[in-house]
Image (cartoon, rainbow, N blue to C red):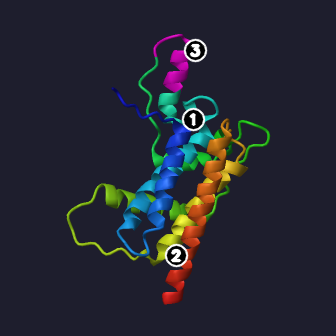
């Protein structure tokens, strides 16, 4: 009998969030869980950026040049070039840009802040170090990680509930997403408080 894993962009985002939550609950006993927090948080943020940009089609989540080629092919009723996702950093730039984030009168783009930019860039840097780990000795100061994680959670909460661009057609997924985001936030707040009390 064949066994299939079925997923979509919403399930992918929530599954990554679940991994963030599960790993965050273990970091107090096992610092190595920070690796999985960072990797899963990167994946979850990417998922929420895609959900907020998609607007019923994939044009806004592709690199602009490829999106134009796909649009031209669509208009000419020709086969599309192979689709691919835009880079993480470009997706992040797009969610801060009204041109991409305001397809509806009530839509909002992510407000520009230095803290958001710093945390997102640090997340990318740490994720890449873990994913493309070069043999070396590496010491990572984890005391600042809860702040980064809380900032990323806030960005995802904005995209999910305030941007006006993510439509939850399934109440189960909507409720699950809200619950896990809140659980992640609570977990990172507890870790932050614990680290600050030990300093």
Tell me the residue that label 3 is attached to: 75
Q: Position of residue 180 (x, y in %)?
A: 59, 56
**Figure quadrant of residue 94:** top right
Q: Residue at x 39, y 60 (%)?
A: 36
Is there a contact, CB below 8 Å, between mark 2 and mark 3?
Answer: no
Residue under circle 2?
191
Q: Where does the magenta region start and end?
A: 68-79
The question of residue 73 being in magenta is answered with yes
Point out residue 189 in the picture as x, y percentages from the top left corner.
Answer: 58, 73
The alpha-carbon separation of the residues under discs 1 and 3 comes to 17 Å
Please identify the quarter of the rendering in which residue 179 is found: bottom right
**Closer to the camera, 170 or 72?**
170
- Lower sequence index among marks 2 and 3: 3
Query: Mark 1 sits on what residue?
Result: 60
Give the CA distance from mark 2 to mark 1. 36 Å
Q: Nearer the viewer, residue 148 or 22?
A: 22
Residue 28 position, x and y percent, is 44, 75
Of 186 and 58, the residue lying toward us: 186
**Which tag is nearer the camera, tag 2 or tag 3?**
2
Q: Secondary structure at mark 1?
A: helix
Q: Circle 3 — which element?
A: helix
Q: Residue 181: percent from the left, percent from the top?
A: 60, 57
Left or right: where 54 falls relative to 120: right
Q: Give above or below for 24 relative to 111.
A: below
User: From the viewer's perspective, is the residue at label 2 or at label 1 nearer?
Assistant: 2
């Amino acid at each position: 009998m064949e066994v299939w894993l079925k997923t979509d962009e919403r399930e992918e985002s929530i599954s990554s969030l679940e991994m963030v939550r599960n790993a965050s609950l273990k970091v107090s006993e096992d610092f190595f869980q920070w690796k999985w927090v960072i990797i899963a948080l990167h994946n979850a943020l990417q998922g929420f950026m895609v959900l907020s940009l998609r607007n019923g089609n994939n044009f806004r989540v592709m690199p602009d040049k490829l999106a134009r080629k796909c649009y031209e092919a669509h208009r000419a009723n020709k086969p599309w070039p192979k689709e691919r996702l835009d880079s993480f950093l470009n997706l992040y730039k797009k969610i801060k840009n009204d041109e991409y984030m305001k397809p509806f009168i009530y839509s909002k783009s992510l407000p520009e802040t230095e803290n958001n930019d710093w945390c997102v860039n640090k997340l990318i840097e740490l994720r890449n170090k873990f994913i493309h780990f070069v043999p070396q000795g590496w010491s990572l100061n984890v005391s600042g990680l809860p702040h980064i994680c809380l900032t990323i959670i806030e960005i995802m909460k904005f995209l999910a509930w305030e941007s006006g661009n993510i439509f939850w057609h399934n109440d189960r997924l909507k409720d699950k997403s809200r619950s896990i985001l809140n659980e992640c936030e609570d977990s990172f707040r507890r870790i932050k408080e614990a680290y600050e009390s030990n300093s």
